[in-house]
Image (spheres, helix red, strand yellow):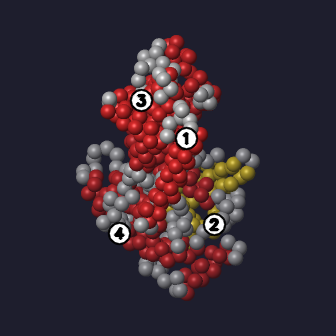
Amino acid sequence: MDVKISVNQVKKRFNALPVVDGVDFSVADGEFVAIVGPSGCGKSTLMKIVAGFERPDEGSVAIDGKAMTKPGPKGIVISQHGSVFPWLTVQQNLMFGLNGDNHGDKAALADHYAEMVGLKGFENAYPHELSGGMLKRAEIARALVVKPEILYMDEPFSALDALMNLKMRNELLRVLSEERHTVLLITHDVEEAIYLADRILVLSPRPTRIQASFKVEQPHPRKLSNPELQKLKEEILSQLGL
Amino acid sequence: MERLNKIWPPLAVLVAIVAIWWYAVIATESLIFPTPGQVVIGTLELVEDGSLWEHIGASLMRVGMGFSLAVLVAVPMGLWMGRVEGAFRTLNPVFQILRPISPIAWIPVAILWFGVGNASPVFLIFIAAVFPMIVQTAAGVHTIEKRYLRAAENFGVSRSKLFRQVIVPAVLPEIIVGMRISLGVAWLVVVAAEMIALRSGLGYLIIDSRNAGNRYDLVIAGMIIIGLIGLALDGIMRLLEKLKVVRWRYGR
């Protein structure tokens, strides 16, 4: 498989404090990679660098072999607190990323994705009229509308309650089974990573680097009670010092 | 029933004020200060000869012009200062110095520059309204949450779309708050400005009524009308806060 994202010896410091200390990994086209690490280890900083919002002090990030210089619709970020615009309706939010005129009927395209994530009937609702879970669906749909090649998810479901968190995992897998994207997920939730990802990278405490890497071979849908996955969870937790 | 419960306490206070006023005027046997009844009769006089509507119209027209000019200048200026750091650093200190100067202090300057026609009060209202609106709009741009700007950057939208669909709607609630504050100040100022010169307006009505034979019934009538119109103007601005595109900002 082709390499989609390649991160080469990325280093970043804030003033004198080294945060990211030589991180090296690559993500194949269509692969779902999860990065887990202790809180405050620099996960989000790493994500911002990979998505192009911050520049590394050393090293480089390349997408499809081309150096990453600035963020763009090729890779859309979905973050913990979300960024669905509260002043636009669901439909207007979903149409937001459609630039230019080569998208045909934008409203129809937006409605198609609203339906895909289960927001049919809420196209004209404002975000403050939606629940936390629906807001997250809207955000995912807004990203999918622009057909990004990569989804960068930074703790996407951690602001949701536990049940909705579990539900959204399945929703995400269902959506990805319809439209395959390369996904880079950052999380502190080991089970979430095991449930979703093809591969899991474990980060060390700050200054962070990749400490271990695990492949998850189980087919979807996965059961976390599966002994192999349980064993994997134990291994990852022990890597995290638990 | 609930509405009634909200309305009757302030109504009771107003009735009490009128009653005390009436009693006090009769008890002190004042020859000049009018009773509420005389104020009502005086007001009806003004209604009948049509001069009341002229004064109200003149004041509202001046406020409308000065305020509209202020909106046209302040909103683009505030947006620009909010977005461009250099513009903010350069202009903000100037506006912070100009802002605390009472518009009343500008009256001599206004007369010097614009004479005693309509232009002077319009200018004074502009001065009164423009600074709070600039400051509020620029502050609004500064408080746009980073995550929204990041999202817009992520989708790679054009500058004009960034303005139309992110910055302006994000700041609109602050602009409306700024407009409300400014309109309140503008209404204060028009009355004060009209007291100086001119031949029409509610401020002129008050001063002229006193000068032309101690018609304190008309002075008080003018004051009450000013209060009621100010309340109505604020009510109109509050309606703007109920618009769907800004409701996200003012609680649910």
| Residue A57 seen in this snapshot | yes
Q: Secondary structure at mark 1?
A: helix
Q: Where does label 3 land, which residue?
A: B59
Q: Where does label 4 land, which residue?
A: A118
**Three-letter amino acid code at the position of disc 4:** Gly
Front position among marks 3 and 1: 1
| Chain ID, mark 4 | A
Front position among marks 2 and 3: 3
- Where in the figure is residue B4, as x and y percent of width and height? 43, 62
The residue located at (33%, 56%) in the rendering is A91
The residue located at (53%, 86%) in the rendering is A225
| Chain ID, mark 1 | B
Q: Secondary structure at mark 4?
A: loop
Earlier-in-chain disc, 4 versus 2: 2
The residue located at (53%, 31%) in the rendering is B32
**Three-letter amino acid code at the position of disc 1:** Val
Q: Secondary structure at mark 3?
A: helix
Is there CB contact under 8 Å for labels 2 and 1?
no
Q: Secondary structure at mark 2?
A: loop
| Residue A71 seen in this snapshot | no
* Vertical side of B183 occupied by A224: above or below: below
Residue A37 is labelled as: 2
- Where in the figure is residue B108, as x and y percent of width and height? 56, 17
**Three-letter amino acid code at the position of disc 3:** Ser
Q: Are marks 4 and 2 on the same chain?
A: yes
Q: CA distance from mark 2 to mark 3?
A: 66 Å
Task: From the viewer's side, name the closer residue of A226 and B186.
Answer: B186
